[in-house]
Image (cartoon, grey):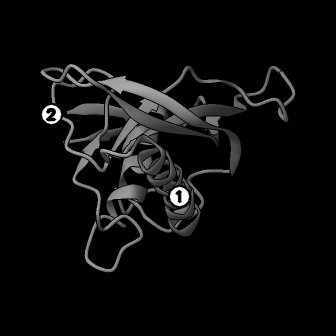
Amino acid sequence: MKFVNTASLVPQTVKAYLEREICEGGLLEDVETLIPSVNSDVPVDPPAIWIVQHPTTRWSGSQPNLSNKIAMSVPFEFVCVEYSDDLEEAEILGISLASRVGSSLMKNFNKVKIDESMPDRFFHKLEFETLYPVGEVTVVGKSERIPATSIIFNFVYIVDWLKCNRKYD
């Protein structure tokens, strides 16, 4: 038997929101690579989305208290990589991909469950934080740097410390 807590379901659920759109007719149908972890040796084949989870903190709209419930905020950065011989075009494609990531998150927010026992409103709120329109990544085996766009969203969820762990066989 293993324990699974609310915090461990968060990145899996965020990934599922994007996976739902990586299909024919989906908002992300052209995406070749989805990297769900900061530590990955998956080759990047653009268009690509790299999911980077940042530290979880108490949500700013939540008051610190001594009860067993608290609202937590976890930022996820979605690094969007597009390739073109024309760098200006690559930047435009990257911004477009980041925008489609945002649309995918909004479209699937609290509608996709990775586990049927999850509550209907797993997340309390989804907040846009930042768009970094121009950045770059280095791909192993390539001498050039590839333009990348990052978009960051905060996912807010409630933790009930007395009920956040579930047992699975």
Amino acid type for the residue under numbered disc 2: Pro
Q: Which of marks 2 and 1 is nearer the N terminus?
A: 2
Residue highlighted by disc 2? 43
Question: Could you say which is closer to the camera, residue 90 or residue 4?
Answer: 90
Left-right relation of 112 to 144: right
x, y percentage for residue 126?
A: 66, 50
Is residue 14 in sight in this rendering?
yes
Furthest residue in direction bottom, as rendered: 25
Q: Quarter holding the N terminus?
A: top left
- Crowdedness of circle 1 by 10 Å Cα count: few (<14), some, many (20+)? many
Q: Residue at x 56, y 57 (%)?
A: 99
Question: Could you say which is closer to the camera, residue 141 or residue 16?
Answer: 141
Q: What element carries label 1?
A: helix
Q: Residue at x 26, y 77 (%)?
A: 24
Q: Nearer the viewer, mark 2 or mark 1?
A: 2
Q: How many marks?
A: 2
Picture quadrant of residue 141: top left
Picture quadrant of residue 41: top left
Residue highlighted by disc 1? 105
x, y percentage for residue 81?
A: 37, 41
Work out whether 3 lies above or below 32: above
- Crowdedness of circle 2 by 10 Å Cα count: few (<14), some, many (20+)? few
Amino acid type for the residue under numbered disc 1: Leu
